[in-house]
Image: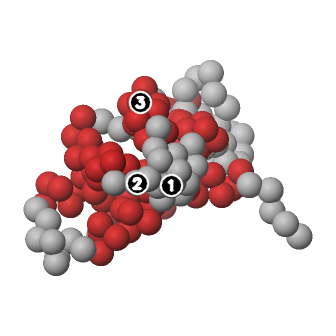
């Protein structure tokens, strides 16, 4: 157990400037990349893709015609896989129940769906799909909120 904790700790430490190629390879740093300096942050590819999608779509105020476009964009960027489509079906079903001038709050809808797991007797695989979709939509909403200018 202590070995696992130590290994996890060491993997999350930035490499100094004197890092050898062996330690760079062990840390997943390619030869064309510079090792991280203390305090440096490099966003993951997934975070970059989520930010790109969040810049186009506000998941808390989706218009009815944007739901399909959001799905297409998420699939195009590889953020939505075939096995996650069940969770996205909730958004499509809710979209069909809206008036044409109403917006869909995907985050609120998925929060309600998660709260109703036990009362609706949702099966395990559907719970997993909804949880994955909820995490993705939460990340999109978070990225969108970080893009908004902060008022002082």
Q: Secondary structure at mark 3?
A: helix
Q: Residue at x 63, y 52 (%)?
A: 144
The residues tagged by marks 1 and 3 sit, at their Cα atoms, a distance apart of 21 Å
Q: Residue at x 10, y 62 (%)?
A: 123
**Left or right: 108, with 37 as reference point:** left
The residues tagged by marks 3 and 2 sit, at their Cα atoms, a distance apart of 20 Å
Q: How many marks?
A: 3
Q: Residue furthest right?
A: 152
Label 2 Cα crowd, 10 Å radius (few <14 / some 14-19 / many 20+) = few
Q: Which residue is mark 1?
A: 102
**Left or right: 65, with 81 as reference point:** right
Q: Residue furthest bottom?
A: 119
Looking at the image, which is closer to me, 103 or 36?
103
Q: Residue at x 66, y 58 (%)?
A: 145
**Left or right: 80, with 33 as reference point:** left
Residue 87 in picture, x, y percent from top left? 28, 50
Q: Which residue is mark 2?
A: 98
Tag of residue 68: none
Mark 1 / mark 3, whichever is N-terminal: 3
Looking at the image, which is closer to me, 64 or 127?
64
Task: Please determine whether, in this image, residue 152 is positioned above or below residue 38.
Answer: below
Q: Secondary structure at mark 2?
A: loop
Residue 70 in picture, x, y percent from top left? 46, 37
Name the colour scheme. secondary structure
Residue 103 in picture, x, y percent from top left? 51, 54
Mark 1 or 3, which is nearer the eye? 1
Mark 3 / mark 2, whichever is N-terminal: 3
Q: Which residue is mark 3?
A: 72
Q: Residue at x 15, y 72 (%)?
A: 120
Residue 34 in picture, x, y percent from top left? 67, 32
> Are the residues flagged by discs 1 and 3 in contact, CB closer than 8 Å?
no
Label 3 Cα crowd, 10 Å radius (few <14 / some 14-19 / many 20+) = few
């Amino acid at each position: 157990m202590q070995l696992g904790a130590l290994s996890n700790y060491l993997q999350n430490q930035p490499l100094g400037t004197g890092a050898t190629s062996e330690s760079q390879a062990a840390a997943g740093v390619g030869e064309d990349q510079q090792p991280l300096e203390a305090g440096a942050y490099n966003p993951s590819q997934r975070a970059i893709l989520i930010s790109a999608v969040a810049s186009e779509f506000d998941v808390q105020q989706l218009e009815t015609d944007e739901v399909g476009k959001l799905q297409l964009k998420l699939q195009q960027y590889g953020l939505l896989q075939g096995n996650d489509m069940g969770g996205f079906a909730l958004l499509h079903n809710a979209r069909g129940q809206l008036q044409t001038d109403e917006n869909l709050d995907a985050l609120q809808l998925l929060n309600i769906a998660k709260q109703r797991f036990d009362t609706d007797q949702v099966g395990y695989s559907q719970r997993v799909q909804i949880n994955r979709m909820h995490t993705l939509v939460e990340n999109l909403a978070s990225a969108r909120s970080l893009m908004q200018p902060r008022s002082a």
